[in-house]
Image (cartoon, rainbow, N blue to C red):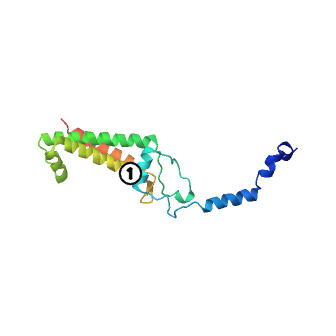
């Protein structure tokens, strides 16, 4: 029993597969598309990845070498939080050493501290966060064609931690 016997009026109205394919092609011809590559990296990419993240992995073989993703591993978030905390400790220690008379050789930092303690701390934390956002946004790109930029976060964290431990040794 075929569909014509059960539904005699419907079978006659349905187009064949070839007709349906031709109709689909005709509809797609009328759709205007730009020839611009929509996979290019812009600042909109960064903003979009914060508010509506979607890309979790590489989808095309051509993108496998250098690619951007919106979702990042939790370890990346914790590394960034740790680096910001180390920057806050560094700012506190810098202000402490400034109070006991240690001269700041970096002219920009000296000017910020002279402008105000809050200005210095804010500039330090905002600058650190901005640099971390940049590194995280390109965390899957290869640095010097060797290692992903995400590994730079580990190097930064442990290097900064060693620096803070050296400063703390002289604290007090």
One can see residue 83 in this view: yes
Return the residue nearer the eye: 34 or 13. 13
Q: Give the vertical position of 136 relative to 146 (above or below).
A: above
Return the residue nearer the eye: 91 or 22. 22
| Residue 100, x across and y down, in percent | 12, 40
Label 1 secondary element: helix
Number of disc labels: 1
Residue, x 13% and y 40% (percent of image)?
99
Quick one: quadrant of the C terminus? top left
| Residue 8, x across and y down, in percent | 84, 46
Q: Residues within 10 Å of mark 1 (few under 14, many from 20)?
A: some
| Residue 127, x across and y down, in percent | 28, 48
Task: Decide if residue 121 is on the left or right side of residue 46.
Answer: left
Return the residue nearer the eye: 30 or 130. 30
Residue labelled with disc 1? 135
Task: Decide if residue 97 is on the left or right side of residue 138.
Answer: left
Residue, x 75% and y 56% (percent of image)?
17
Quick one: quadrant of the N terminus? top right
Residue, x 41% and y 51% (percent of image)?
46
List the single residue furthest toward the left: 101
| Residue 36, x across and y down, in percent | 49, 63
List the single residue furthest toward the top: 172
List the single residue furthest toward the front: 9
């Amino acid at each position: 029993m075929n569909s014509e016997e059960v539904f005699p009026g419907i079978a006659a109205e349905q187009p064949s597969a070839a007709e349906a394919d031709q109709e689909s092609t005709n509809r797609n011809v009328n759709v205007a598309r730009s020839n611009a590559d929509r996979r290019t990296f812009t600042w909109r990419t960064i903003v979009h990845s914060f508010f509506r993240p979607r890309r979790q992995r590489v989808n095309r073989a051509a993108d496998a070498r250098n690619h951007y993703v919106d979702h990042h591993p939790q370890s990346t978030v914790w590394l960034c939080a740790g680096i910001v905390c180390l920057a806050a400790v560094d700012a506190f220690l810098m202000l402490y050493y400034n109070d006991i008379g240690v001269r700041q050789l970096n002219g920009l930092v000296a000017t910020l501290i002279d402008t105000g303690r809050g200005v210095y701390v804010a500039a330090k934390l905002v600058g650190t966060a901005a640099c971390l956002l940049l590194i995280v946004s390109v965390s899957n790109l290869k640095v010097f064609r060797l290692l992903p930029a995400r590994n730079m976060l580990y190097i930064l964290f442990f290097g900064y931690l060693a620096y803070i431990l050296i400063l703390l040794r002289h604290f007090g």
